[in-house]
Amino acid sequence: MFGQLRMIFTLLMIAGIAGAGMYVVKLRADNVILKANQIQLEQSIKSQAKVLAQQKKDFEKIMEANKEMNELVNNLQEDMRQLDKRFTKKGRDIGKIAEKKPGLVEKIINNATERAKRCVEIASGAKLTEQEINATKKSEINTECPAIANPNYNAYAVED
Amino acid sequence: MRIILIILLAFILTSCTFGERKIKIFQVEEPRPELNLESPEPLTLDDLRWIIITSKNAEEVFARLEAQGFDPVLFGLTDKDYELIAKNFAQIRSYLKEQNAILEKYKEYYEPKDEEETKTE
């Protein structure tokens, strides 16, 4: 009787130890999986952070490009308004002036055409000359398109 | 002898699968080649000359034209049409400038000059 109990007890002990051993093995396996998951998650967070940083940079670039384009469009529109103003300023009638002083008007419009021609060349990608870049006074600028021909002249800071 | 037979049998049964490695799949991002189309040469326009002709100076203008060797003929615009043509050209110029600026911005955005910056990003 006592011998049987001892056997059962021994078997239970062995089973307990084996179970504990298996449990430890399982825990170790789980631990390995969890570690791998942790690494994956960390990598994923890193790559997400990278993507977010890139998105932020791209967004800033887009905003900057839009701002610059808006400035350019506004300046070009102002060039157009100034041209319109030149023809109609103070009730000016270019036809009547030309009738009275054809020689003077001819000279004025030929000079303006020369400047306008240069504006088209610049708009098509021609490089600015030193003189155009350094122009800061009204007497030095290309009055047809200061927005694109004279980057250092604040064309529309003061309305005339 | 038995040992050798057992080892051989083991090799045959396992089909020499010892040391078989797992296939690793990895991705390498290959950047798109840059388009790099050359920009057209900037325009170099020829000079042109406007001549103002009125009812009073017409004879003088035609005489001057003939003296300069030109045919005594002029293609005319009224003062209003002259204003319109000036504004039309200004519009074309603005459009050209805007288009070029947009192209530049696209190029800067998609093909930044600073290669290091893109690599580190």
Image (tube, rainbow, N blue to C red):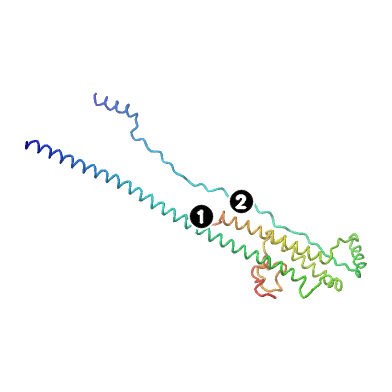
Q: In the picture shown, does residue B55 fall above or below B92? A: below
Find residue B8 and report its horizontal and vertical position in percent.
29, 26
Q: Badge 1: few (under 14), some or many (20 or more) residues near its Cα, within 10 Å? A: few
Position of the N terminus of chain A, as image quadrant, is top left
Residue A31 higher or lower than B73, as above or below: above
Instruction: Determine the residue located farthest toward the front in the rendered image.
Output: A1
Q: Which label is found at residue B118?
A: 1
Q: Are marks 2 and 1 on the same chain?
A: yes
**Which amino acid type is marked by label 2?**
Asn
What's the residue at 44%, 54% (across, down)?
A48
Q: Residue furthest left?
A: A2
Residue nearest the observer in this picture, A103 or A12 = A12
Q: Secondary structure at mark 2?
A: loop
Quadrant showing the C terminus of chain A: bottom right
> Type of residue at label 1?
Thr
Q: Position of residue A153 (x, y in %)?
A: 65, 71
Placement of A92 over or under A42, stated as above or below: below
Residue B36 marker: 2
Q: Taking A128 as reference, is B15 left or right?
A: left
Q: Quadrant of residue A28?
A: top left
User: How many C-alpha atoms fall within 10 Å of the one at disc 2: few (<14), some, or many (≥20)?
Assistant: few
At 65% across and 52% down in the image, what residue appears? Answer: B38
